[in-house]
Amino acid sequence: MARALQLARGGRYWAMPNPHVGCVLVRDGQVIGEGFTQPAGSNHAEIEALKAAGDARGATAYVTLEPCSHHGKTGPCADALVVAGVSRVVAAMEDPNPQVAGQGLARLRAAGIETECGLLQAEAERVIPGFIARMRRGRGRVRAKLAMSLDGRTAMASGESQWITGPAARQDVQRLRAMSCAIVTGSGTVLADDCALTVRAGELGLPAVEAARASARQPLRVVVDSRLQVPFGARILNADAPTLWCHDEALPAPPLPPGADAQATIETFGLPRGANGLDLALLMDALGARHCNEILVECGPRLAGSLLQVGLLDELIVYMAPTLMGNLAQPLLHLPLSQMADKVDLELADVRRVGRDWRFTAMPRY
Ligand code: AOF
Ligand code: ZN
């Protein structure tokens, strides 16, 4: 199962909106086939492993997610395992997709196959947190990425905020983008940095074949631009990736930049006002409805602070550069708190060095 989990990660840059799953077929103590989820609409992990094995009669299948029982874009994997004559199936977890939810395992048992579920379950859940969140609450996992200096500053008073971190951290961010379904930013960041928020094959630091596959799809770019300040020429509106241009619904939808490309790639979205600017919960629900599993927020201190305050941030990834930006620079987050009782406690899940910087992964405790 540990090997299956390792394989599963191989699909993280292209299986979406499908969960990336790994499968290992074992017979007489020998691995006879391995596979992981292919790009959406293509083979599931089990089918890949069966294909690799050729003859899988009498084998045990280790899968990181319960085999599916439904006819989606592909046929049910449970049926394929039955037809292949597999004698035992060990799954790490049930599929939280209500279309499956235990029925895959039930189907296998009905066909006389021995089943087990729950082996390395916690580890399996950590591989596909976005898919699980979307299935359980209709909204994917929202992760904010921020960069700061050792003294906790994120942008100079002049507004400059690019290149706080080094090349390795930037490559890490490219991979975070590649595994995300949507990238959310604010108009402030767009106006200051003119960021493109695309996945670029040459900057992923992955083997060429994997990089090409990972950049073949681009995450949906989402810009929160309540007062419609983003200009036509901004790179976030270019045709390199689709863009959802969110604005205050009280304003008329903006005209799109001229050209057929813009009509095809930009969509405007009027949102009502919420407690803290536009209603971001509604935005996240809309992204859930669009099958976004992992949502990466790359924004400035204001939007990140708002998301945290309304309880929408599931995870914070903070890169800390060994540099000092001084007390005139902006703090990591705009969080107007005055009492100790108001502080937001985090659960620190991981700390590691990324090139010359450090990366902290933490979960707010709401
Ligand atoms: C599996 N093995 O590798 C994956 C599964 O539209 P489809 O046919 O591609 O089905 C998508 C659903 O299948 C997805 O929502 C999830 O419940 C399950 N994913 N199942 O047996 C796999 N990726
Ligand atoms: Zn399947």
Image: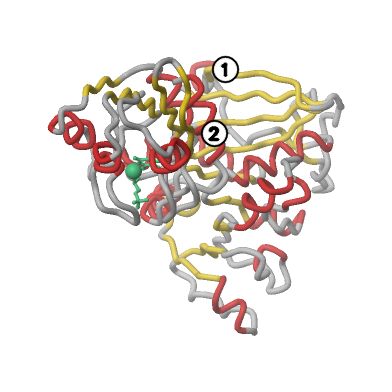
User: Can you see residue 76?
Assistant: yes
Colour option used: secondary structure
Instruction: Look at 68% across and 69% down and name the residue there.
Output: 238
Residue 195, by quadrant, is bottom right
Tag 2: amino acid: Arg
Left or right: where does residue 214 sit relative to residue 194? left
User: Can you see residue 279?
Assistant: no
Indicate which label's residue lies in the foreground, 2 or 1: 2
Instruction: Look at 66% across and 66% down and name the residue there.
Output: 240
Return the x and y of residue 26 as percentages of the image width and height.
Answer: 41, 23
Q: Give residue 348's mark.
A: 1
Residue situated in front as seen by the camera: 139 or 172: 172
Return the x and y of residue 187 as percentages of the image width and height.
Answer: 64, 57
Q: Give residue 59's mark.
A: none
Instruction: Look at 16% across and 28% down and name the residue there.
Output: 109
Secondary element under disc 1, as helix, strand or loop, is: strand
Residue situated in front as seen by the camera: 250 or 42: 42
Q: In the picture shown, does residue 21 fall above or below 244?
A: above
Secondary element under disc 2, as helix, strand or loop, is: helix
Tag 1: amino acid: Leu
Left or right: where does residue 329 sit relative to residue 129? right
Q: For the residue with label 1, is its CB less than 8 Å from the closest atom of ligand 1? A: no
Return the x and y of residue 58 as percentages of the image width and height.
Answer: 30, 26
Which residue in the structure is indicated by mark 2? 9
